[in-house]
Image (cartoon, rainbow, N blue to C red):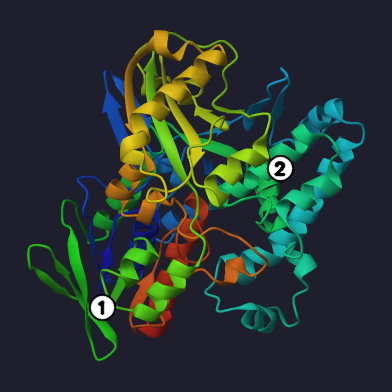
Amino acid sequence: MTRVVIVGAGVGGLGAGVRLAAAGCDVLVLEAAAQVGGKLGIARSEGHTFDTGPSLLTMPFTLEETLATAGVTLSDRLDVRRVDPLCQYHWDDGTALATHADPDATAAAFEALEHGAGQAWHSLLAQGKRTWDLSLPLFLSAAISGPIELARRSGRPIDPRDILAHTTLERYGARHFRDPRLRQLLDRYATYSGSDPARAPATLSVIAYTESAYGAWHPMGGMHRIAQVLSDVIREQGGEVRCSTPVARIVTEHGRAVGVETTEGEVFPADAVIANCDAADLYDGLVSAPKQAAQIAAAPASLSGFVLMLGVAGRTPGLAHHNIWFPRDYRAEFADIFDDPQPPNTPTIYLCNPAATDPSCAPDGDESWFVLVNAPRHGPVDWDAEGERYQERILDRLDALGLQARERARTIIRRTPADLERLTGAPGGAIYGTASMGPRAAFLRPRNASPAFERLYLASGSAHPGGGLPLVLLSGKIAADLICRDLQLAGSR
């Protein structure tokens, strides 16, 4: 039986493990932390439960298809509820706007702010669909080495305009909307890949289409339940998932990965190894690959995040599941993150309030808030020194928004970029690895089949096709498919 060892029990590794176990492989997953999930973690305090990473499920078909390879139906394992509105946006002039999966409802909200913006939104979604229909089968669901291979696969040269790679997201938004508030809303999609909208390709506007087409969803019991279900399915198929088992190195011989050694000195031979970790940690830690390590170091790092998890007393009238408060000067926020790294003075506030959908996350009548602000990575900013001061600044901002955070908070858990680095292994706490800056950025992410060693594969948010829960599941699919091809297995279906 083919033995595959997976380093890391994040969603990419677990998703690949499900597919490979279903294909008949002997799967072993080794996780350093005490729980599965990686960034999709869980924290508890004073009766409150918090998801510590991704806060919504989009493109649920990626999870459905992963489980289906093992004959498992998503609805049999998880109670997944639609979240609507998708998000409630707020501006400092008092304007509020809700986006919805129903494109007409969102278009009406846009039209109320700017004449003609409703039709512009429909036009943007139509282009997003064209880009999506081209990208999903040719790029997002398969290994890729560059534009030439993409052209070969499609049967024709790819015009950058087809995938909106010819302009930035910021310029693209300015072509569609005059109102600065609507431009801000579109620019925010750059942060889904940890990037700056002034430098990120307009390709990222496709996210607006996917949210409208597939909706936003929440698994009852919390997002971390996704990782638990994937782990359970691996075990049910005869695989093994070991937590609290840090890996020291991936064993290589004659240019090929042949096993994994733990920090305790235990060696597990393997026919193939999947690295479900940050690519920088892989190439400058688990293996020695100076060329790949240098390429990653030369690429711009993605932004990080500063997180406060607050267990608050009582319910908040008008607070949706997903909420955003924009600052007056959005451009200054990205300058603080990428150009002159410092904690943004007035950052955008994202507040996830899962109790709006799932009351089980908090004691009766209370709420469990996950508050995230974009932040520069640890290193250029010493987040161990800045953490407490910045927490006070964010609490001040929440209070200024009328949320009475200090008065109502029963418990507060803080996670700085330095904490994210220690907890997840992401260098500097850069959530998405490298940022998506420039028209070729998508082709520069680390490949799923390592060019440094045979039988070594990558499945993570820092590798192709990118970060975010659905893309990480697709990364796991690609890695599993490559192993099935290279080892001549039946396939991950």
Residue positioned 73% across, 64% down in the render: 163
- The residue where tag 1 is placed is 2
For residue 41, side relative to residue 110 (left or right): left
Residue positioned 69% across, 37% down in the render: 101
Q: Secondary structure at mark 1?
A: loop
* Label 1 to label 2: alpha-carbon separation: 46 Å
Please report whichever mark, 1 or 2, sits nearer to the chain's N-terminal start: 1
Residue 355 is situated, as x and y percent measured from the top left of the image, at: 46, 21
Residue 347 is situated, as x and y percent measured from the top left of the image, at: 56, 32
Q: Is residue 157 above or below residue 170?
A: below
Q: Nearer the viewer, residue 29 or 284?
A: 284
Residue 365 is situated, as x and y percent measured from the top left of the image, at: 41, 9
Toward which corner of the image does residue 48 lie, by quadrant? top left
Residue reaching furthest bottom?
Answer: 254
- The residue where tag 2 is placed is 186
Q: Badge 1 local density, few (<14 within 10 Å), some, or many (20+)?
A: some
For residue 365, side relative to residue 134 (left or right): left
Instruction: Inspect the image, locate mark 1, and give the three-letter code of the amino acid beneath it.
Output: Thr
Q: Secondary structure at mark 2?
A: helix
Q: Badge 2 local density, few (<14 within 10 Å), some, or many (20+)?
A: many
Q: Which mark is residue 250?
A: none
Residue positioned 75% across, 61% down in the render: 164
Residue 400 is situated, as x and y percent measured from the top left of the image, at: 55, 14
